[in-house]
Amino acid sequence: EAGVVQSPRYKIIEKKQPVAFWCNPISGHNTLYWYLQNLGQGPELLIRYENEEAVDDSQLPKDRFSAERLKGVDSTLKIQPAELGDSAVYLCASSETGNTEAFFGQGTRLTVV
Amino acid sequence: AQKVTQAQTEISVVEKEDVTLDCVYETRDTTYYLFWYKQPPSGELVFLIRRNSFDEQNEISGRYSWNFQKSTSSFNFTITASQVVDSAVYFCALSEVGDYKLSFGAGTTVTVRA
């Protein structure tokens, strides 16, 4: 069975440019998460979806970040405009429900120059 | 406030040595879940174990074992007879019922030398 798939794996952009990350969760998983991982730190939740609904986006910087999960499957996370401080790894994860173990993708490493 | 504390930043051992990773958590909930994840250099977080707060029974899976003690709010992880492939960053995480997000510790980098 395929795991969580993310693309791209790496992205280098100039500051003030837009960027988007894509995530395909494990089939049948209703819950999807986007986490941010800074170097040397543990991941921190940005947003959690239950099917199509964003049920926890309290940590998402809404002035520049947006996310969507159309049809309750794939999800896209966007940053516009990107800032130097956004350089990090963006991890997508999915789980069957909100309380079961989450499985992570390999992440997208973003470098803003 | 930090909910999960992994006091050990880095641990270096020689192959076949045992290594224990400490994890101390903080929560006011009586029902919660604890997790361990492994992050190898490839970057993907690999799920290792989930334990609910009502199950204090220790668990062993191959060379891995976990010691859950509610009295000290600890959920420690031991790798027995370590191997080079065990080299990775290990994260402990807490999930509170109703919150459904993982609160991760800062991670412990384990380096196993041949």
Image (tube, rainbow, N blue to C red):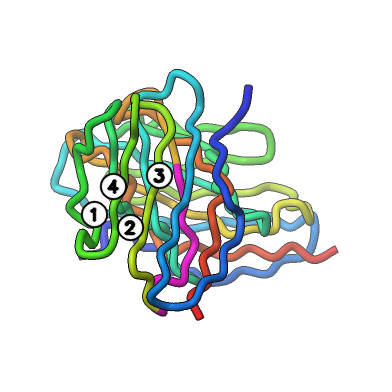
Amino acid type shown at disc 2: Val
State the image quarter where residue A85 is shown.
bottom left
Residue topped by disc 3: A76
Q: Position of residue A48 (x, y in %)?
A: 29, 41
Residue A47 bears which disc, if any? 4
Residue topped by disc 2: B4
Residue B76 bears which disc, if any? none
The residues colored magenta run: A84-92
Amino acid type shown at disc 4: Ile
Q: Nearer the viewer, residue B106 or B26?
A: B106
Q: Nearer the viewer, mark 2 or mark 4?
A: 4
Q: Position of residue A34 (x, y in %)?
A: 38, 47
Amino acid type shown at disc 3: Thr
Secondary element at tag 4 = strand
Q: CA distance from mark 3 to mark 4?
A: 11 Å
Amino acid type shown at disc 1: Glu
Q: Position of residue B81 (x, y in %)?
A: 74, 49
Q: CA distance from mark 2 to mark 4?
A: 20 Å
Horizontal arrangement in the rendering, residue B105 relative to residue B53 (left or right): right
